[in-house]
Amino acid sequence: MESEQVKADPFNRNCGSRQVIDRIGDRWSVLIVLALAHGEQRYGELAQRIDGVSQKMLTQTLRGLERDGIVTRTVHASVPPRVDYALTDLGRSLLDLVAGMEAWATTHLGEVEAARARYDAR
């Protein structure tokens, strides 16, 4: 029995590609990928690096990224237990994309803030 090849369509709410976009476009996912760009980190290091993320959101996002094959979770048998997170090859393939988003946001921050001020002044 041949399987039918389905064309990905992120504009279709039932398409899995939309879930992928939701995952990689989520602010916490983007920040976690950026934080892991230079190597593995412990949970506490990520929590400290990503200002404003709650423990619940960090845990949920890391689990989602692990489920999607973007992040690995390694538990070390030590006392106390140590857990490290790192990007997989698939996760590293996102680095250019998220680094580009970061660069765009930092480069154009002044313009965006000016546009917001004009809009809010109306």
Image (spheres, grey):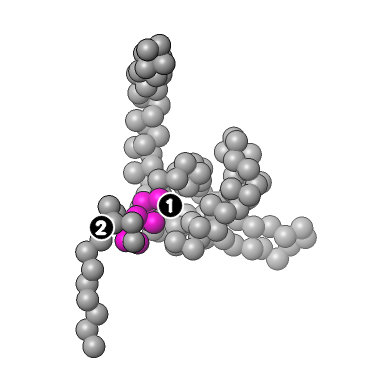
The majority secondary structure of the magenta stretch comes to helix
The answer to whether residue 49 shows anywhere in this view is: no
* The residue positioned farthest toward the front in the image shown: 122
**Residue 18 within the magenta-colored segment of the rendering:** yes
The answer to whether residue 44 shows anywhere in this view is: yes
In the rendered structure, which amino acid carries the disc numbered 2? Asp
- At 25% from the left edge and 57% from the top edge, which residue is drawn? 9
Of mark 2 and mark 1, the one earlier in the sequence is: 2
Quadrant showing the N terminus: bottom left
Q: Which mark is residue 23?
A: 1
Q: Position of residue 32 (x, y in %)?
A: 51, 46
- At 72% from the left edge and 60% from the top edge, which residue is drawn? 81
Q: Position of residue 46 (x, y in %)?
A: 59, 44
- Camera-nearest label, 2 or 1: 2
Q: Which mark is residue 50?
A: none
Whether pointer 2 and pointer 1 mark residues with C-beta atoms closer than 8 Å, the reply is no
Left-right relation of 21 to 27: left
Q: CA distance from mark 2 to mark 1?
A: 16 Å
